[in-house]
Amino acid sequence: MTTPGKTRVAIVFGGRSPEHGISCVSAGSVLAALDPDEFEVVPVGITRQGQWVLASGDPGQLAIADRKLPEITAGSGAELVLRADPAVGGLMVLDPAQGPVALADVDVVFPVLHGAYGEDGTIQGMLEMADIPYVGANVFASAAAMDKEFTKKLCAAEGIPVGPYVVLRAGMTLTEEDKERLGLPVFVKPSRAGSSFGITKVDDWAQLDAAVATAREIDTKVLVEGAIVGREIECGVLEGEAGGAPEASVLAEVRVVSGHDWYDFEAKYIDDACEYDIPANLPEHVTRQVREYATRAFTALDCSGLARADFFVTPELDVYLNEINTMPGFTPTSMFPRMWAASGLEYPKLVNRLIRTALRRAGR
Ligand SMILES: Nc1ncnc2c1ncn2[C@@H]1O[C@H](COP(=O)(O)OP(=O)(O)O)[C@@H](O)[C@H]1O
Ligand SMILES: [Mg+2]
């Protein structure tokens, strides 16, 4: 039943991408941050196979335990069906005895999903068809930011510097001219992935084919990028309140230490291998430049709600955009919430603002 006066929000997490576990941890923190006096939560888990279940709303079950990430399985709860029909819009529980039973309409969906089938426009399209407001980027922006080729092309067209890269579509390999232009080392990555999955740093051209094959396990389209020697700087962006210009957070610097050469998966989530500076220690004019590029990139991709823009800043203080994430990590140690906390917006207020923005955008 819907409680009058409360906003009914479905937190959707898990999912079919390799970032399933990270999504569960992010969702656990979002769940814990929602004020029960204001929100009624419907925790919706998606299994690795894509089945929707009514999951536990206990944040404790959605934390990293013994270096193991949480997982949603078919046994996690009753099966759910989303009716993508505006007339009957909403979630149904599939009761084995009674068949589908309406779980009541949700006011807004917060898809705390990373990567494929979550951050790439697919679930956004489904929610559009069901006429359910949702937090974050729309179909186009999600798809554009998910694809590193198009992120670079759209941002470069708006004058934001991006590093040298070559797109290898299915069956293509690097030419000798490409190799000369990019130089070594290069980063070989799936065009549409995240959390450093499928990425290899290549120091010797003899390793290239194996690296491309690894990336192609995730995406047939592969990017080969010249390595940028520089500091890794991140910026949070939020859609302006009441439809105003997008706002940039203070910046963060991520420094990889102890045994990791670059910001790979283990460094990101498992090992205590990173140091962070918030705010990043950069000259004032560079900080201003990065924040301006971040909001420009947000607009260039037609983002809404939130995004995290990631950059490299070279020793000469040149700034290059690396990528945009339209559903950045939301774990307690994730950069996005920490950058906003440092900008004066604490985690619960941040989550609240995202939900309010989504409802306002939908005219609700
Ligand atoms: N062109 C590059 N130059 C230097 N380092 C890179 C480059 N591309 C990726 N990296 C390293 O790999 C990490 C992950 O790459 P990224 O493109 O951000 O993929 P993901 O979407 O998986 O986070 C970066 O944070 C950085 O440490
Ligand atoms: Mg990244």
Image (tube, helix red, strand yellow):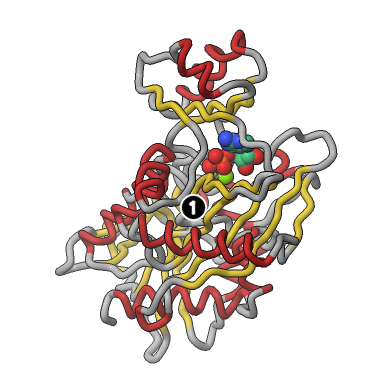
Relative vertical location of residue 105 with respect to residue 170 in this rendering, above or below: below
**Picture residue at 64% right of the left edge, 59% below the top:** 335
**Picture residue at 36% right of the left edge, 67% below the top:** 134
Relative vertical location of residue 66 with respect to residue 298 in this rendering, above or below: above
Viewer-proximal residue among 127 and 244: 244
Relative vertical location of residue 177 with respect to residue 54 in this rendering, above or below: above
User: What residue does disc 1 label?
Assistant: 325
Relative vertical location of residue 216 with respect to residue 68 in this rendering, above or below: above
How crowded is the residue under tag 1: few (<14 C-alpha within 10 Å), some, or many (20+)?
A: many
The single residue placed furthest to the top in the displayed view is: 206
Report x, y in % for residue 178: 47, 18
Res 4 quadrant in image: bottom left
Q: Within 8 Å: ligand 2 and the Cβ of disc 1? A: yes
The single residue placed furthest to the right in the displayed view is: 258
Res 175 quadrant in image: top left
Q: Quadrant of the N terminus?
A: bottom left
Q: Quadrant of ligand 1?
A: top right
**Picture residue at 53% right of the left edge, 21% below the top:** 214
Report x, y in % for residue 163: 52, 38
